[in-house]
């Protein structure tokens, strides 16, 4: 039922709005009990306040550690209203009912983040506060429990509308949010203890993992429209490792953004060069590191004489791994986005970007894309993700250590072939391909050349299917450099993406009748189809390609296939029973192959 | 420091081992305070016990709701030992230090599971217990807090070794586990409140989501060996929805198993027929529903005249979508596994199976596979997964509603083509293809025929790439029925999987030199290669294929390509700006196409 607030207990760490709520309660002649700093502030504001210690009549002992842990407080909260026995006991023991409790807690996580030592963190654990919160929430049939200053308006509204009462709906909602608060509070403490116990003893196994997801940004829906509600959340009270500068990212945008960001951040760390990625459906369509473009490459990638900074070079290369798939991509850059990079993005169809920073001119250009809807996320490059990661599928929970292994040059030291000549650029390409497959849905195999991915084979169920799938992409990529393709004569006004698609379809050659009609409409001159012989002859000129596989090659046929795509450098984890046979194949082709010892499955 | 236990407070719901621990403490002359049922049981066992009410001298009011919420109890727990002021205050107020607290809570989740109403669930929330647990854990410098009977041995061991003391290491560990317990307890309460508030008002947005992962089964590692520790967890205290009957599943096995189980469970619900799936790397290599095999199919699938029950039919079909990829698969069956199904699995290379039941003979056959290492999981078919699902990536949390939409016949009602003739078997195939893509990494397109998947295109970044990738698989699948393939003459003793692989490689035709040598070794007679003309002519005889796409077809080229693979029935969500053009294409080929309105992205 609706209940008049006669007596309130107030004890808050966060004093936002405290005076205001005190004076509001005063208007309704509410008897205020309070403690310490809260009592002082309320009194100063002109409220009449009774100190809890004087109210309970209990001596102030143990530096106030047990002030509110008293039957007079907890009885006043917990006694069942309307229960004759309880009412009589309240009277006979001079216990007044408490109708409203306003308590908020010093956030434990902040103590931890401040770098305090173990005893200090523990000293900061609140005991009395959570006890009152929990008791009040339990007795929500009679008591309203306010645990955050953000709830004051809700309280004031209800009390104003009812002449100083609280409603059952309000009290139930506040009770739910009170337990949400204590759950989060104890979750943070438990996590801290588990971390400390694991530090004391690496073999220690925590009894559980309390993960509190705090909604930070509602999303329109999840993977699909029928999957609402959905939300981006922070874990515990940790801030999100990025901020939204522009646009309204969706669920899949964010999956792409976070994976892409991890990829470029690691790639930069491992190579020291600016890195870029172009994501679609939670796998990279392309990725690359900075490397000057030759005049030939500028022509193939159709970018004319645009000025290119290292970041811009990286994105042009990433976007040109598979420009057809990159249509509507999510881009990621390891470095601050400069104007040159923004100018490259300006003319591409793209959904959004994540990067550690944006120069003002670049940001203006990006914000103007898609009629202002282009998504711009700023990542915090200093953020370190937690060690353990969690997911649930069909109601089953999975915990694993994050795949934090950095794929750098040290993973290329174990060369198992006779040819051991790994030039610096080949190393960079192998690292690029490896970091890329690390963030590609498994199984995956990636081909790289000149600091750019040229074929990413994702999501296949057999190793050799990945090799071939990515190999077909490499063929398309390299055939774009064939004179007949570069010589296609487009009419004036044909758009960039139309040219990209037309070239790819011309290379693939399997156009339908209608596609052919449309294709020919774009051109001033109808080209002859590419013959198999022309393709084969051109592909034979491809050399120096680097390949990484997310798991070992089980049989030599993989190497035989790789050889068809000009592959010279290979890295895979090794460890197959057939390693000797696979090594022998690589030796036959004069390849340089390293065993990284590092499997990179990604799901 | 190591501290002698002089006084203990015991108040437990779970009375396992209570008498034993009471008598153990008696040996060390520990003064026991206790309440209600715990006190009674301890006294009966021969312990000397002081009732808390008589110890505090506080009247027993409000039906005992505030019994332990008393300065004499909380002071005894929280007073800082060795602090002169606190020590003096303890003395002057006759507060004895409490060195050991044994409190466990009635699991809130059990009250909820029992179907109790809201007031009963709330009435069961413990207030005094968590307050004592939290206070004791805070003061772990002096107090040991035992929250589970499973910790008694640890306590006894420490006290025995030290002549009745507790060590700082033990107390810290127990404190950490105490907060883990209260976090889980309040997490369960907060979840319950959030559910109830959402029921009251569907627009209610919970302030957070406390997900407590409870490790149920340690795993050797996660996705990769460097990702240890890893664990299978239950969410809250919900039991896992399956049990392990045999083998030691790994992380990726379990990802496969849970996805595969959801697929077959839904497929059975939607079609009423026994369903099977064959998973590899978290996507289905194949899936199928029960349908009698023709003599021709028996020959193509190389299973002779084995007796086949509906479940066995379904698995044979699922396995034969892409038998090369299904090598080492994780199998799932919607129905109890009978002996016929087990006999089919017996001769296949497979990692494990999940099903709702196993007949004893089938279980024996399966347990014997892989020298006893074959994984057998029994799923609980009555289990309903929670509504919301969570994951974290790189430290960022994602919440979304589970994709609970069932793809059944009702999703095929909106036929948008002139031809509206959807026979029952075509409907079944469209449902099969749709439920399959629902559990396939996106983008995905699936082709089905005769109750079985014949091409699953997974994990691609453009729609038409999926159409083509899966189309190539359909080609391989249908070419297995070409007389030249069926006529391959294998030598005696060539293994089943070797025959499967050899046929596929013969069809694909792109064998390397060495592969060709190995291939010819398997045969008594070297066949001529399949010509393009032979392939084309054979493919023209494929008809009646059903296709589902996890998102709409953006352009008509997809339909043009589908027509090359004998596709007659199509379902996709619809909603593209080009829908009219896509419909027109389908009409040109006389296809029957439905718009489901249901997007099925899966990541």
Image (tube, coloured by chain):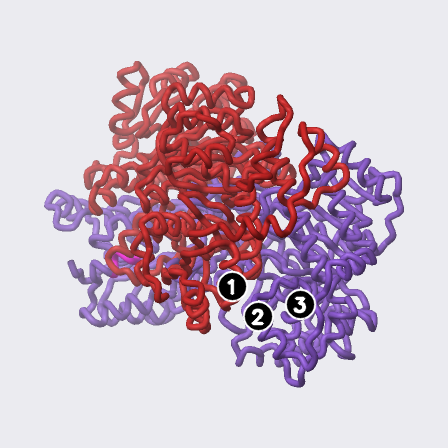
Chain colours: A red, B purple
* Residue furthest to the left: B84
Discs 2, 1: same chain: no
Q: Is residue B309 left or right of residue A235?
A: right
Rendered position, B573 above or below B370: above
* Tags 3 and 1 both on a single chain: no
Residue farthest bottom in this picture: B492
Determine contact: label 2, label 1, CB under 8 Å: yes
Whether residue B327 sits left or right of residue A269 in the image: it is right
> Helix, strand or loop at disc 2?
helix
Subunit under mark 2: B
Tag 3 residue = B506
Q: Chain of mark 3?
A: B
Q: Which residue is mark 1?
A: A560
- Residue at the location (17% across, 61% down)? B2
Name the secondary structure under disc 1: helix
| Residue ID at (70%, 66%) | B320
Is residue A542 something that shows in the picture?
yes
Rounded to the nearest angstrom, the CA distance separating label 3 from label 1 is: 16 Å
Classed neighbour count for the residue bearing mark 3: other residues with Cα under 10 Å, few (<14), some (14–19), many (≥20): many
- Residue B475 is situated, as x and y percent measured from the top left of the image, at 72, 58
Residue B184, labelled with which disc?
Answer: none
Residue closest to the eye, A494 or A273: A494
User: Was residue A541 drawn as part of the magenta stretch in this picture?
Assistant: no
Within-10-Å neighbours for mark 2: few <14, some 14–19, many 20+ = some
Q: Write the start and end of the magenta stretch as one range.
A: B170-174
Residue B9 in picture, x, y percent from top left? 30, 57
- Please state the horizontal and vertical placement of residue A179, each as a whole percent of the image: 44, 40
């Amino acid at each position: 039922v609706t209940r008049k607030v006669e007596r309130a207990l107030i004890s808050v760490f966060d004093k936002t709005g405290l005076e205001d709520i005190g004076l509001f309660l005063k208007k309704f002649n509410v008897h205020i009990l309070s403690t310490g700093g809260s009592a002082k502030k309320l009194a100063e504001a002109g409220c009449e306040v009774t100190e809890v210690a004087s109210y309970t009549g209990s001596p102030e002992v143990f530096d106030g550690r047990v002030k509110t842990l008293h039957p007079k407080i907890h009885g006043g909260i917990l006694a069942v209203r309307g229960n004759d026995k309880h009412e009589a006991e309240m009277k006979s023991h001079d216990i007044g009912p408490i109708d409203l409790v306003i308590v908020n807690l010093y956030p434990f996580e902040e103590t931890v983040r401040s770098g305090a030592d173990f005893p200090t963190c523990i000293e900061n654990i609140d005991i009395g506060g959570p006890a009152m919160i929990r008791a009040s929430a339990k007795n929500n049939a009679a008591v309203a429990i306010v645990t955050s200053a953000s709830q004051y308006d809700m309280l004031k509204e209800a009390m104003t509308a009812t002449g100083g009462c609280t409603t059952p709906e309000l009290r139930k909602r506040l009770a739910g949010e009170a337990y949400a608060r204590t759950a989060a509070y104890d979750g943070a403490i438990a996590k801290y203890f588990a971390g400390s116990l694991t530090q004391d003893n690496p073999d220690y196994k925590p009894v559980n993992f309390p993960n509190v997801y705090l909604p930070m940004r509602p999303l329109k829906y999840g993977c699909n429209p029928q999957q609402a509600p959905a939300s981006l959340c922070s874990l515990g009270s940790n801030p999100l490792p990025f901020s939204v500068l522009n646009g309204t990212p969706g669920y899949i945008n964010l999956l792409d953004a976070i994976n892409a960001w991890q990829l470029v951040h690691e790639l930069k760390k491992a190579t020291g060069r600016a890195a870029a990625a172009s994501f679609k459906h939670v796998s990279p369509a392309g990725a690359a590191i900075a490397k000057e473009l030759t005049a030939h490459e500028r022509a193939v990638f159709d970018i004319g004489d645009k000025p290119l900074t290292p970041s811009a070079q990286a994105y042009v290369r990433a976007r040109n791994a598979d420009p057809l798939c990159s249509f509507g991509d999510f881009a990621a850059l390891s470095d601050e986005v400069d104007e040159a990079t923004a100018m490259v993005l300006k003319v591409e169809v793209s959904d959004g970007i994540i990067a550690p920073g944006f120069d003002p001119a670049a940001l203006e250009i990006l914000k103007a894309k898609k009629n202002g809807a282009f998504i711009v996320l700023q990542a915090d490059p200093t953020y370190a993700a937690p060690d353990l990661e969690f997911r649930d599928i069909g109601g089953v929970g999975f915990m694993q250590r994050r795949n934090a292994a950095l794929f750098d040059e040290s993973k290329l030291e174990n060369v198992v072939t006779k040819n051991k000549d790994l030039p610096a650029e080949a190393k960079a390409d192998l690292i690029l391909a490896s970091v890329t497959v690390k963030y590609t849905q498994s199984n995956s195999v990636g081909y790289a050349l000149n600091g750019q991915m040229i074929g990413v084979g994702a999501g296949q169920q057999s190793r050799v299917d990945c090799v071939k799938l990515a190999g077909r992409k490499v063929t398309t990529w390299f055939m774009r450099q064939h004179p007949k393709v570069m010589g296609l004569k487009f009419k004036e006004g044909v758009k960039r993406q139309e040219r990209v698609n037309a070239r790819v379809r011309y290379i693939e050659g399997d156009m339908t009748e209608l596609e052919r009609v449309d294709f020919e409409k774009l051109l001033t001159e109808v080209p002859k189809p590419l013959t198999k012989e022309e393709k084969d002859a051109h592909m034979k000129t491809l050399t120096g390609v680097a390949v990484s596989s997310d798991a070992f090659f089980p049989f030599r046929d993989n190497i035989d296939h790789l050889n068809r795509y000009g592959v010279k450098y290979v890295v895979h984890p090794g460890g197959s029973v057939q390693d000797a046979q696979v090594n022998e194949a690589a030796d036959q082709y004069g390849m340089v192959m390293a065993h990284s010892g590092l499997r990179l499955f990604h799901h």
